[in-house]
Amino acid sequence: MKVFQHVNDIGDLKATVKEALKVKQNRFAHKDLGENKTLLMVFFNSSLRTRLSTQKAAMNLGMNVIVLDVNQGAWKLETERGVIMDGDKSEHLLEAIPVMGCYCDVIGVRSFARFENKQDDYEERIFNQFVKYSGRPVFAMETATVHPLQAFADVITIEEHKEVERPKVVLTWAPHPKALPQAVPNSFAEWINATDYDFVIACPEGYELDEQFTHGAKITHDQDEALRGADFVYAKNWSCFRDPNYGKIISKDMNWTITAEKMALTRNAHFMHCLPVRRNMIVTDEVIEGERSLVIPEAANREISCQVVLKRILESLA
Ligand code: AN0
Ligand code: CP
């Protein structure tokens, strides 16, 4: 595997989840695979889980790890070609990327949507430059439009906790004070669409996601209707995808917060969120602390999803 960005990049999802559960049973079984191989993690944005779980996964495979926080200590990077660089940016991405490639064997990139230009975000301008110019396999640690390591961990978590063969999974928008990317819900939709689960997306009008990810899922603007009979409730805020409001907030409706009353509509559903989460905006204290909350097991599975991805990449280098 040379690029990891979409569910199709890992081949058969069922078989890959099986592989993940096997890795989880013995996470040091392949500790020689990464010997003398170096992972470079490049962060344009903050992280807690991705930063720690990706390092841990790499260490389980015997890799060395270098972390670069682009906005702390590195030169400020220009990303547009053709710009006269007379401002505060000392270096261009077009030199920085191949230089980074000199010092490592695999690169992980975190680069969120900037919401300046929808086309730039949805063409994955930053991530694709790493693919094109680094000369190394590259995987997404949340890019402008996707967060596949999270979605993969979420599918593993659902497989581990489902109580019926074909669970009803609800992805619901919830309110948040700041504009957030669509990457997490995009990938969640893409990966759940690759399973045979009953999948419903609930969001206020105007918050519909890009159909390239949601295609095939049921979409409703009635959260209560979506929650009825749900086995898993996956809450997340995102900003608008559709024009003319791309990257903007058009609702902060607190009636969409996941409360105990909302969870009572479900079939004793598990609560899920990728974290970080704003309590009592997205979800109440009571629900996130409740015994059906899976937020910590989801985070724990980030080590596993990443280890499977790194294993595939290392196997293709060998
Ligand atoms: C990010 C987002 O919503 O995409 C990262 C989530 C994993 N969240 C925030 O910026 C708060
Ligand atoms: N869920 C997730 O990716 O968290 P971080 O932003 O802390 O990495």
Image (spheres, rainbow, N blue to C red):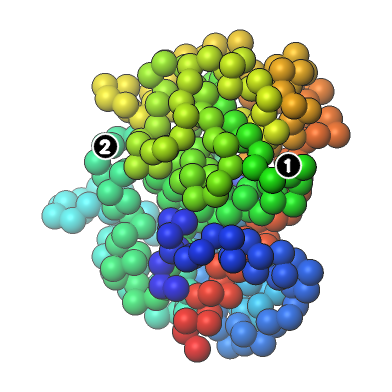
Looking at the rendered image, the disc whose residue lies closer to the viewer, 1 or 2, is 1
Specify few, some or many for label 1: CA neighbours under 10 Å numbering under 14, 14-19, or 20 or more. few
Q: Amino acid at mark 1?
A: Val
Q: Depth check: 230 or 80 in front?
A: 230
From where the camera sits, is residue 276 visible? no
From where the camera sits, is residue 97 visible? yes
Q: Residue 184 shows which numbered tag?
A: none
Specify few, some or many for label 2: CA neighbours under 10 Å numbering under 14, 14-19, or 20 or more. few
Name the quadrant containing residue 100. Answer: bottom left
Name the quadrant containing residue 171. Answer: top right
From the viewer's perspective, tell me whether residue 290 is left or right of residue 76.
right
* Tag 1 near tag 2, CB within 8 Å: no
Task: Give above or below for 138 relative to 168.
Answer: below
Residue depicted at x 59% and y 65% = 16
Q: Amino acid at mark 2?
A: Asn
**Residue corresponding to mark 2:** 117
Q: Secondary structure at mark 1?
A: loop
Q: Depth check: 38 or 302 in front?
A: 302
Residue 152: x and y in percent read: 58, 54
Task: Give above or below for 293 relative to 13.
Answer: above
Residue depicted at x 47% and y 56% = 7
Residue depicted at x 74% and y 66% = 24
Q: Depth check: 75 or 123 in front?
A: 123
Q: Split into 4 quadrants, where in the image is the N terminus?
A: bottom left
**Residue corresponding to mark 1:** 164
Residue depicted at x 45% and y 41% = 186
From the viewer's perspective, tell me whether residue 86 is left or right of residue 284.
left
Task: Give above or below for 79 relative to 221.
Answer: below
Residue 276: x and y in percent read: 64, 38
Residue 69: x and y in percent read: 51, 57
